[in-house]
């Protein structure tokens, strides 16, 4: 089952430029089935309950976003994980794009 996060009522802002997602050897990771390169983008998500910094992974072209951009997030998926006694939630999206027009601040 995939768990998607509704971002319509959240303000998502790039807080770090996209970087290659790296494996333990420092090589850029690629998607298993497609071979598309993977990217990590740190963002700040703000809603009525406060804010949180998360990292969103995308695959394919490097997201054309920069620090301070308000973002449109396409299909944000939350992926719970647990390894060696540690656990957390990873986030993945189909795409990250700068918001344009009057909706940029919402």
Image: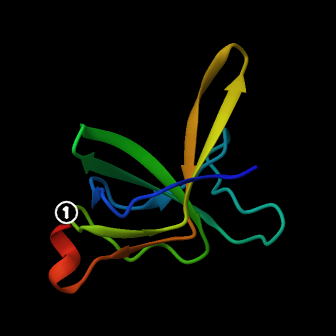
Q: In this view, does 32 lie to the left or right of 6?
A: right
| Picture residue at 55% right of the left edge, 78% below the top | 61
| Residue beneath disc 1 | 68
Can you say whether 33 is above or below 1 in the image?
Answer: below
Q: Is residue 69 left or right of residue 82?
A: left
Q: x and y percent of residue 99 in the render? A: 28, 77
How crowded pointer 1 is (Cα within 10 Å; few <14, some 14-19, many 20+) is rated as: some
Q: Is residue 11 left or right of residue 40?
A: left
Q: Nearer the viewer, residue 56 or 106?
A: 106
Residue furthest to the bottom: 101
Q: x and y percent of residue 11 in the render? A: 26, 58
Q: Nearer the viewer, residue 26 or 39?
A: 39
Q: How many marks?
A: 1
| Picture residue at 63% right of the left edge, 57% below the top | 28
Quadrant in the picture for the C terminus: bottom left
Q: x and y percent of residue 54 in the render? A: 40, 43
Q: Which of 65 and 45 is in front in this view?
A: 45
Q: x and y percent of residue 93 in the render? A: 55, 62
Residue furthest to the right: 33
| Picture residue at 29% right of the left edge, 49% below the top | 44
Q: Nearer the viewer, residue 78 or 68?
A: 78
């Amino acid at each position: 089952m995939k768990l998607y996060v509704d971002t319509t009522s959240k303000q998502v802002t790039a807080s770090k430029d996209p970087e290659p997602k790296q494996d333990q050897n420092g090589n850029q990771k690629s998607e298993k089935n497609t071979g598309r390169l993977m990217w990590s983008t740190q963002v700040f998500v703000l809603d009525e309950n406060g804010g949180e910094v998360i990292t969103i992974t995308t695959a394919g072209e490097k997201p054309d976003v920069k620090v301070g951009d308000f973002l449109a997030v396409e299909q944000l998926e939350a992926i719970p994980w647990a390894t060696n006694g540690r656990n957390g939630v990873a986030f993945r999206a189909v795409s990250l794009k700068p918001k344009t027009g009057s909706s940029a601040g919402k």
